[in-house]
Image (cartoon, rainbow, N blue to C red):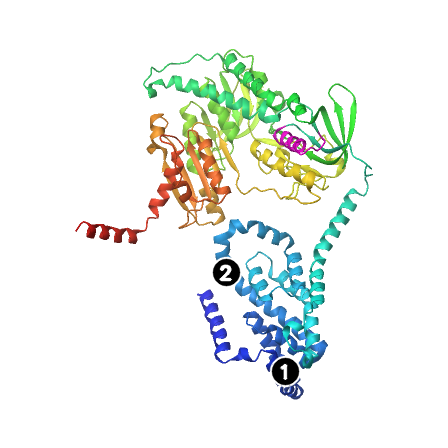
Amino acid sequence: MKKLLIVIVVLAVAGLFYAFDLHLLLTLDTLKRQQEEFLRLRDQAPVMVSLVYFVAYVAVTALSLPGAVVMTLAGGGLFGLLWGFVLVSFASTVGATLAFLVSRHLLRDWVQRRFGDRLAAINEGVRKEGALYLFSLRLVPIFPFFLINILMGLTPISTWTYYWVSQVGMLAGTLVYVNAGTQLAEIDSLAGILSPGLLLSFSLLGLFPFLAKAFNGWLHRRRVYGRWPRPKRFDRNLVVIGAGAAGLVASYIAAAVKARVTLVEAEKMGGDCLNYGCVPSKALIKSAKVAHQMRNGDRYGLAAHQPGIPFGQVMARVHKVIATVEPHDSVARYSSLGVEVLKGYGRLVDPWTVEVALEEGGVRRLTSRAIVIAAGARPTVPSLPGIESSGYLTSDTMWEALRHLKEPPRRMVILGGGPIGCELAQAFARLGVGVTQVERGERLLAREDEEVSALVRAALEGDGVRVLTGHAALRCIRDEQGPAVVVAASDGEKRLNYDVLLCALGRSARLQGYGLEELGIAVERTVTTNAYLETLYPNIFAAGDVAGPYQFTHVAAHQSWYAAVNALFGQWWRFAVDYSVIPWTTFVDPEVARVGLNEGEARARGIACEVTRFSLEELDRAIADSANHGFVKVLTPPGKDKILGVTIVGEHGGELLAEFVLAMRHGLGLNKILATIHTYPTWSEAGKYAAGEWKRSHAPARLLAWLERYHAWRRG
């Protein structure tokens, strides 16, 4: 009602303005004809005329009515340069701010709801540098000020910032027009006020804030680099520390554009993903799934069979898979691509120098124009009493520690209910290990919707995992009964004996040991970077797990493109890293795949959305594969087919997600997916059927009723 009232008032005032031909008064000819009368009134009541003029100016600008330029000239013609300048300066700013507030109150919420994702980058830019952009616009009078008022009202810039920047930014243009008004008799047209030379001067003046920004950047660089001697020449264009996913991609890109690049790795090429994470865990999960299918052969019309679990052979296969993939990330391959690979510990000596303690002995110092830190992360180990003597394993150490076991461990306790903990708990349980999974929180996979957590818990428990949520690990003990971990729950403490204790509590960025402290590069949970992945020093970048905010191999590769390109070409153009569409999959059975919002996040953020759901129980291929459990859930704005987020729970969920990731990345809606031919019978049809569910719920009921009548008429 308030918005409606404001609209009515604005329209009424504008209507009266034109109904009484007031717009005819705000012309140059009228002003010149009536100047003597206006001057007489001013001499009779200078305060009252000044007040009426001020209020009228505010009203014209606040309502975005034509005539502000003429009124500015009138300020000079009636009140002279000084007093006219003061009146116009404050009246124009107050009026502009009122127009800004009207636009914000009436339109901003609607615009942000409808176009929020497209405006995200603009909103972020305005939050950071809105004052700079506004100041530049205000300095150049060729931009329509009423349009600036309306458009800036749609952004997050604060009202106070808008006011004072407008006040200061419009001073130059106001002075020119008020001064012209003092020579009113000599003005033949409004166009003649701004000569081409004056317009050029204003345009150059509009560049001043950006030149000032560049100057501030130069000062910042001098300040942060001031205590370091800059090399006269550089050995390399780029040095990359760490040969995980981020480091490999960054060095590959640099070599591809013919830069001279050195990649430094202290441990194994391929990093966590190849050696300890993605590759070995998926190999283990596959073996576990085959064992599970053998036990449940009757689902496929076969005899159920309890498989023998030669655990050593299973682990040998895991290491064979690693060895098969290893050449893809090897020293030989990257050397053939033009990357110099040094095995050893890299350490930053100054912003341009990396000192490498070589694996074979000796030290090399390399100077480089740019450096990318891709040091990765290590498993998080809780600081429990007794943990150091507990014999615990992590996702890094367990592959080597378990490879020589002939039989599955009898008892395994896994700390952590996140993706790593859930994947390994289910896999080991399917391989005959007695698994107890301990999670401090109230549910597994806390980032997912509650129904997803419940479904995953049921799947793990169905495979024999003992799931203890709401249980916090207190301490590790070792006595005559053997090693154990003591956990606390609402019903008291519990002792959990184990043969293997596995810490699966996520990973922490590697932040020590390679010179960040000496250079003063800020760290919190990760290395602090800006939108371009620059650290404190604009030539030192961070990418991958060490930079956050996501710890996924595919995000590390994504970031490394930005880091490498900005490092090599940032002096000409920089690219802000884009996190708008980030998919991920937890490889439990059934898989949990997601991109964008889920229901819980939408509720927490107050985002209105519709939920469309397609059950995989109805998918023909899922039925044929005896895997018809799970669902596809799509979030869309009310009445729109735009995709806000997708959660898929089911077999091949990670592969099914790719279609939705592509659609979200390129702004395609559910109607486009529905109109795409999908091979029958395939799992990919699940995406099309989900789109069909949305379409069915938005069928035009009134039109269909008329069509029914039409067809009845056609039948006679």
Instruction: Tell me the mark number nearer the camera, choosing from 2 and 1.
Output: 1
Question: Upstream in the sequence, badge 2 or badge 1?
Answer: 1
Q: Tell me if residue 703 comes above or below residue 517 in the rendering.
A: below
- Residue 4: give x, y in percent of width and height: 45, 66
Query: Dot 2 surroundings within 10 Å: few (below 14), some, or many (20 or more)?
Result: some
Instruction: Give the residue number, with chain letter if any, for mark 2.
Output: 107
Residue 252 visible, this angle: yes
Identify the amino acid type marked 2.
Leu
Q: Secondary structure at mark 2?
A: helix
Mark count: 2
> Considering depth in this image, is 80 or 454 the residue closer to the camera?
80
When asked about the image quadrant of residue 379, the answer is: top right
Mark identifier at residue 32: 1
Identify the amino acid type marked 1.
Lys
Q: Secondary structure at mark 1?
A: helix
Magenta stretch bounds: 244-261
- Residue 302: give x, y in percent of width and height: 33, 16
Q: Tell me if residue 194 comes above or below residue 349 in the rendering.
A: below
- Residue 555: give x, y in percent of width and height: 57, 35
Residue 353 falls left or right of residue 106:
right
Residue 623 falls left or right of residue 553:
left
